[in-house]
Image (tube, grey):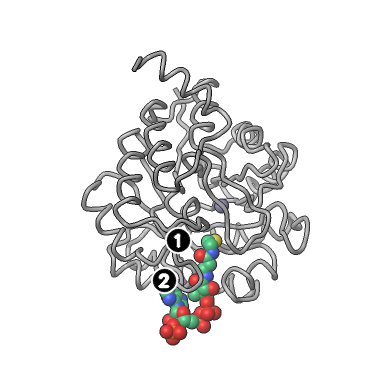
Amino acid sequence: MERLHVTDVAPRDGLQNQSVPVGTDGKLQLIERLAAAGVASVEVTSFVSPKAVPQMADAGDLLPLVQQRLPALRTSVLVPNLTGLQRARAAGAREIAVVLSATETMNRKNINMGLEQAAEVSEQTVQAALAAGLRARAYVAVAFECPFEGETPLDRVVALARRMAAAGAQEIVIADTIGAASPAMVRDRLGALRQAVAAERLAIHLHDTRGMAVANAWAAVEAGVRRFDASVGGIGGCPFAPGAAGNLATEDLVLLAHRCGFETGIDLDALLDAVDHAQALLQRPLGGRSSAWLRGQRAKRQPA
Ligand code: COA
Ligand code: ZN
């Protein structure tokens, strides 16, 4: 059976925007539950300015704990610049992700750089990571629509993806940061991107703002992409991109995959335990669109 590769980004994208502070232990337990459910790859945290994102201030403590407890888990961390890479390396990072937005304004709001400077810094950071023996992912953010500039020109998205691939990033993550994509846009954009970057190196990162994340995920599967970011419980959103709602929920993606003949290695009942844990951490009900049904199925299998 063919596999869809899932990276759970809840500990980073999911938590960065939450007003309830989550402690290092709570994050570690969430990641342990994800791993116990069979999630093989997790974006653990980000090495960004703690003034910009206070929730990620414990990155240097969390990463070594995760890698010690879960040595087989593939871990990545978001870094915006060389300072972030330095901090990540000091904490023992094995894989980093740079974040390059495809518009001028989004880069300024997110990382206080213009587009060209952001591209150069991302290239340098990827190259330095590879030289140090790390793996690198490169996000191309607001790859569909920017909250400040409207629809993002496709030729620019393709050019930036090509540039990050040329810099050596093993994985190019096409991100619908504010959840504005449609299945038709996903088909067209990934079709164009595949001409520039091999499908095996492309990943997609979706948000569910308009209720189309699962449809968009399926469009990506049909376009030949097999690498997905998703967030358990559907938590997520960029604090600097107004209007971004939660991510594609990992449970929705996994259910879609299993219903359509793909394997993920992830057990849905165990994944619900991770949703429950995230709910306890954030003190509010969470879950993707399939959660009510999944919980009902779990209750039938595990009567109280
Ligand atoms: N981690 C921690 N501190 C960092 C840092 C990093 N990756 N990069 C820079 N800094 C520190 C500098 O050392 C400096 O510290 P000082 O004031 O004690 O001297 C301070 O931050 C300002 O440095 P500067 O290079 O001028 O940064 P900036 O103020 O222009 O901010 C970023 C740039 C990238 C650090 C900041 O915008 C940021 O962290 N953005 C992250 C956004 C994010 O996480 N978005 C969501 C995910 S997409
Ligand atoms: Zn996101």
Badge 1 density bin: few <14, some 14–19, many ≥20, Cα 10 Å: many
Would residue 70 be found to the left or right of residue 211 on screen? left
Q: Position of residue 37 (x, y in %)?
A: 35, 33
Q: Position of residue 282 (x, y in %)?
A: 45, 48
Q: Position of residue 201 (x, y in %)?
A: 51, 47
Residue drawn at point x = 77 percent, y = 63 percent: 149
Residue drawn at point x = 45 percent, y = 67 percent: 54
Q: How many marks?
A: 2
**Residue behind label 2 places its C-beta within 8 angstroms of ligand 1:** yes
Q: Quadrant of residue 225?
A: top right
Question: Which image quadrant: the N terminus?
Answer: top left
Badge 2 density bin: few <14, some 14–19, many ≥20, Cα 10 Å: many
Dot 2 or dot 1: first in sequence order is 1
Foreground: 211 or 228? 211
Looking at the image, is 223 positioned above or below residue 88?
A: above
What mark, if any, has residue 84 been given in the picture?
A: 2
Q: Secondary structure at mark 2?
A: helix
Looking at the image, is 223 positioned above or below residue 48?
A: above
- Mark 1, residue position: 78
Residue drawn at point x = 61 percent, y = 45 percent: 207
Foreground: 166 or 144? 144
**Residue behind label 1 places its C-beta within 8 angstroms of ligand 1:** yes
Q: Tell me the amino acid under the disc marked 1.
A: Leu
Q: Tell me the amino acid under the disc marked 2.
A: Gly
Q: Position of residue 226 (x, y in %)?
A: 52, 37
